[in-house]
Image (cartoon, coloured by chain):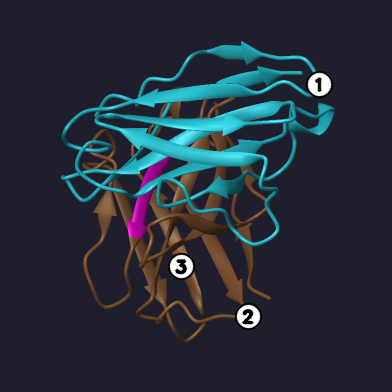
Amino acid sequence: QLQLQESGPGLVKPSETLSLTCSVSGGSISSSSFYWGWIRQPPGKGLEWVGNMFYGGTNYYNPSLKSRITISGDTSTNQFSLQLGSVTAADTAMYYCVRRRGDSSHVDYWGQGTLVTVSS
Amino acid sequence: QSALTQPASVSGSPGQSITISCTGTNSDIGNYNYVSWYQHHPGKVPKVVIFDVSKRPSGISDRFSGSKSGNTASLTISGLQAEDEADYYCNSYTTSNTWMFGGGTKLTV
């Protein structure tokens, strides 16, 4: 059974970089059948697609975040990470790491989510 | 990148049917059959209930069904049950190689 687990600071200061890691067990991030990515939900708001990585291939990012975001993977640890720079209070959200199927494009596995607050 | 358009809320009585619409453009819903729907109970992890417009994952009740016409996708839940009360989000692939969510619909049973 695939499991994803987010980790990282719960509090980030404005203008700094938000860094989260997703640890994957029960599957490999180097699989050619899946995308690995992030979805977030600001408090009281809806879901927002952040970005996906396809290991060894192209990454795709939300255009509204594209200038500030990097998603990368490490097969030696079977983890992938999110870095979001120059954060503001608008980046405060529950961040979920997810697996998206390449054949149908839907998200079939979610991490439990981690709340990141941007505040001084 | 604007969100897909969903009604903010819908409601129905137990046993009734409801439909949630999700309107996009020729660049997303109208161009691909990669539309999925997610059920999200507050405090829990979202769960896919429909993918590829009308397919149901294993374990999802056949009370959930999906369809698409032009730039609008729809999720129908028949035989409403109290446990169906949740937020529902549509999601579509786009011609920009990105994915887009709808704004979400709160279903009250």
Q: What range is drawn magenta here?
A: A47-52
Residue, x 63% and y 73% (percent of image)? A2
Dot 1 alpha-carbon crowd within 10 angstroms: few under 14, some 14 to 19, many 20 or more = some
Residue designated by label 1: B14
Query: What percent of the width, then of the height, locates residue B48?
Result: 57, 48
Q: Name the residue located 54 percent from the left edge and 59 percent from the top edge.
A: A108
Q: Is mark 2 on a helix, strand or loop?
A: loop
Q: Where is residue B21 in the image (x, y as percent from the top left)?
A: 44, 23
Q: In which quarter of the image is the C terminus of chain A?
A: top right
Q: Locate residue B32, reporting x and y percent.
A: 25, 47
Distance CA(mark 1)–CA(mark 3): 43 Å
Asked if residue A84 is positioned above or below residue B26 in the image, the reply reads: below
Of residue A95 and residue A120, the one placed in the foreground of this image is: A95
Q: Which amino acid does label 2 sit on?
A: Gly
User: What is the number of the mark on residue A80?
Assistant: 3
- Can you tell which quarter of the image residue A88 is in? top left
Tell me which amino acid carries mark 3: Phe
Mark in the foreground, 1 or 3: 1
Q: Residue A44: in sight, yes or no? A: no
Q: Mark 2 points at which residue?
A: A26
Please indicate whether residue A52 sits to the left or right of residue B70 in the image.
right
Give me the disc on residue B6.
none
Q: Where is B36 relative to A34, above or below? A: above
Nearer the observer, disc 3 or disc 2?
Answer: 2
Helix, strand or loop status at disc 3: strand
**Foreground pick, B17 / B100:** B17
